[in-house]
Image (spheres, rainbow, N blue to C red):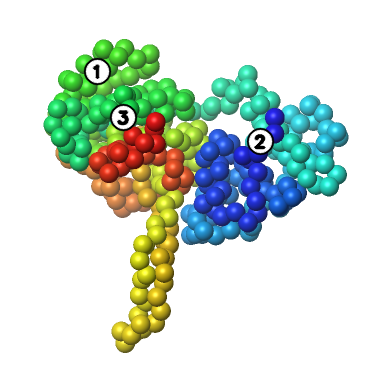
Amino acid sequence: MFYKNLLINSNATIKDALKQLSKSGEKCLIVVDKKNKLLGTLTDGDVRRVILKGKLLKDKINNIYNKNPIHLIRGKYSLGQTKNIFLKEKIDVIPIIDNSLKVVDIVVFTDLYKKNNNQQRKFVKSLVIMAGGKGTRLEPFTTVLPKPLVPINGKPIIELIIEKFLENKVSNFIITLNYKSKILKAFFQEMKPKLNLSFIDEPKPLGTAGALSLLGNKIKKPFLVTNCDTIINVDTDDLLSFHVTNNNDLTLVASAKEYVVPYGTCKLTKKGYLQNILEKPKFDFLVSIGLYVINPNLIRLIPKNKTFNMIDLIQLAKRKKKQIGVYPIDDESWIDVGQWSEYRKAVDRLI
């Protein structure tokens, strides 16, 4: 099978690459010129590294991809050789070229190892869904329903969140509850989902991180935490691998977002005179989207029975010299449904 969506032109931008990696579902792109001549390979790790080093989303990929890619020549390889290369080099895709260096096919690791794909997953994954808030930004719906049950195209938000994480092989779900908790529990009793699900009842509203103190010793390994107003599509194996490989105590997932000021902005001299006008300038930001990986040892930092938000935990962890990492994802890999303006967009995107 030839994967056209794995080919990317060398003149593409970092933003283009991040978006294409997200849509393809693979971890590597094949870099080609206009005639599909092989130039190199570009991994999701390459892209994330340069974003974290301050490269702009509008920058070209031509200086960041691997210019000496492993490849096969059409008609001059065997299936056994291909499998050996995958296992030895630990890569995800191999381009196949003809004598003119044109990419004519691509071999993908998961195609060769479909039967063993589940064995490649290294992590037993637990997800804590923080669902105890009032959801005041979604009033008047939330004066009647808990925010997790606000529907989007016939399904409540929390069901959509769980479905996304089930697709990414999360096996254990823990939901923290406070506001209208009985209604939310009744929903799951009626729904009878076939998954490992448990609840934590907050005695009072404890903020976006306080309820984690109630986990006690239930979780022994790094676990995921998500808000209940974002629907996220992320490779949780890759996220957890990033967290562990970098020896992070906490990793926050951030969207690589480009913001365009819709006006001409004035740059002034030191004396206050006009120096020049920048027409609709663009700025890049990494925006926290409300998904985290946390080591169990950080639970001890969270005070008992006290309102405590995730930003409080992050700041306290920094003061304690804990290592905090950032995992960038494409801006189209998540949907914010926590306020009406974004809720309406979510309804359209999820049709």
The residue drawn where x is 46% and y is 25% is 167
Q: Check if mark 1's residue and mark 2's residue have beta carbons within 8 Å.
A: no
Q: Is residue 304 left or right of residue 262?
A: left
Q: Is residue 27 left or right of residue 301?
A: right
Marks 1 and 2, how far apart at CA: 42 Å
Query: In front here: 336 or 329?
Result: 336
Query: In front here: 308 or 341?
Result: 341
Q: Which residue is mark 2?
A: 3
Mark nearer the viewer, 1 or 3? 3
Answer with the quarter of the image where residue 60 lies.
Answer: bottom right
- Answer yes or no: is residue 331 visible: yes
Mark nearer the viewer, 1 or 2? 2
Secondary element at tag 2 = loop
Q: Which residue is mark 1?
A: 187
Q: Where is residue 54 shown, x and y percent of the image? A: 48, 59
Callout 2 amino acid: Tyr
Badge 1 crowding class, 10 Å Cα cut-off, few under 14, some 14 to 19, many 20 or more, is: few
- Answer yes or no: is residue 218 visible: no
The residue drawn where x is 74% and y is 29% is 83
Badge 2 crowding class, 10 Å Cα cut-off, few under 14, some 14 to 19, many 20 or more, is: some
Q: Quadrant of the N terminus?
A: top right
Label ID, residue 152:
3
Q: Where is residue 325 shown, x and y percent of the image? A: 43, 47
Callout 1 amino acid: Phe
Q: Is residue 119 left or right of residue 70?
A: left
Marks 1 and 3, how far apart at CA: 16 Å
